[in-house]
């Protein structure tokens, strides 16, 4: 017996149902345009008794004003020009229906035109204002979502990827080293600690996504020594004793510069025997963060504009600072200047 493929044997109703939504924009355009065209046609060819239609004129005029607002506010720019012009024209020419049947003095005609122009102008102005408000809200939502995605990407790269890089390097080093029970026990302890830190970073990122008003994750310069504990030979840390209090955003950016530079050293120059992290502050220039390494014994190509450094350079520039990265002697140098 032939098996029925659900993808080939669908009910027609489901396909028709899925195809129905695209018709809604066309229907939204057709309703106000059709009403406006009907009103214009009646204006041009009406020959009936004004006394029968005069009581309904305010109702029709109000409906046309509502259509003006809806078409200008909700349709696309191109569609709103067409449909809005039709509905606006219908509203402005509504008094023509009575002038063609029973011509009135010039003063009365001008008064009727003014009475129709003023509400239409208010409706158009209100519709344009509401459209602008809608566009600003939509833009704010898009910007907020984009900033949230960038924040998540930064956290994943700066913290989770940092810990995973350390785990990978530890495992690779263990594969080429001899078996030592004590060293293996210390290795497993380091791997466990790195895994716990990675999970904690993931939990923090997920909590930030769930919370509506979560505060951005900030690090301080006091946490820099913890970054140096991941190296067998602890790098040198030079920090002035008279370093003043700095804005939290500056300290967080400096921490991320050090984190990115040290992670790249572990990834690309694990054999570096001399690593230096230096901080300097000048009232005019601001805070300078410099990370240098002596490089591997056999130099090899190293990326100068990786994803992490590129994103970090953009972030530093947004703060008014500058980040540079390039060869330095036999090694590499990353330097960032942050205004304070």
Image (tube, rainbow, N blue to C red):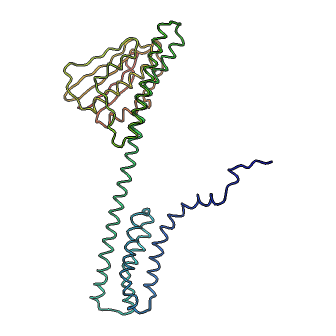
Task: Say which residue appears at 36% left-offset and 89% top-offset.
Answer: 99
Picture layout, residue 245 above or below residue 147: above
Picture layout, residue 287 above or below residue 298: below
Residue 227: x and y in percent read: 36, 20
Residue 177: x and y in percent read: 52, 9
Residue 287: x and y in percent read: 25, 27
Picture layout, residue 44 above or below residue 184: below
Q: Nearer the viewer, residue 114 or 157?
A: 157
Task: Say which residue appears at 29% left-offset and 89% top-offset.
Answer: 106
Picture layout, residue 3 above or below residue 71: above
Q: Nearer the viewer, residue 10 or 251?
A: 10
Which residue is farthest front? 1
**Quadrant where the C terminus is found in the figure:** top left
Query: Residue 237: which quarter of the image?
Result: top left
Task: Say which residue appears at 28% left-offset and 84% top-offset.
Answer: 111
Residue 2: x and y in percent read: 78, 48
Count the marks.
0
């Amino acid at each position: 017996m032939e098996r029925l493929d659900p993808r080939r044997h669908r009910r027609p109703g489901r396909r028709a149902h899925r195809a129905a939504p695209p018709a809604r924009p066309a229907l939204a355009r057709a309703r106000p345009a059709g009403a406006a065209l009907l009103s214009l046609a009646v204006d041009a060819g009406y020959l009936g008794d004004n006394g029968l239609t005069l009581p309904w004129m305010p109702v029709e005029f109000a409906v046309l004003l509502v259509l003006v607002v809806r078409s200008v506010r909700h349709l696309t720019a191109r569609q709103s020009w067409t449909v809005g012009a039709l509905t606006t024209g219908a509203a402005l020419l509504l008094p023509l229906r009575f002038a063609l049947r029973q011509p009135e003095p010039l003063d009365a005609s001008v008064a009727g035109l003014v009475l129709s122009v003023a509400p239409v102008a208010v409706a158009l102005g209100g519709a344009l204002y509401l459209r602008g408000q809608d566009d600003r809200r939509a833009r704010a939502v898009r910007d907020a979502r984009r900033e949230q995605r960038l924040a998540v990407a930064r956290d994943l790269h700066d913290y989770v990827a940092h810990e995973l890089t350390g785990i990978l390097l530890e495992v690779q080093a263990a594969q080429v080293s001899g078996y030592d029970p004590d060293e293996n026990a210390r290795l497993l302890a380091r791997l466990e600690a790195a895994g716990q830190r990675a999970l904690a970073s993931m939990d923090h990122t997920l909590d930030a996504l769930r919370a509506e008003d979560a505060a951005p994750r900030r690090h301080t310069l006091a946490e820099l020594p913890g970054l140096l504990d991941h190296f067998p030979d602890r790098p040198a840390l030079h920090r002035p004793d008279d370093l003043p209090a700095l804005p939290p955003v500056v300290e967080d950016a400096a921490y991320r510069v050090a984190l990115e530079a040290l992670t790249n050293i572990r990834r690309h120059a694990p054999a570096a025997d001399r690593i230096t992290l230096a901080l300097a502050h000048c009232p005019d220039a601001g805070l300078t963060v410099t990370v240098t390494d002596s490089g591997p014994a056999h130099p090899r190509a190293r990326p100068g504009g990786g994803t992490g450094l590129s994103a970090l350079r953009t972030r530093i520039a947004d703060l008014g600072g500058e980040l540079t990265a390039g060869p330095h002697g036999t090694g590499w140098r990353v330097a960032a200047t942050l205004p304070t």
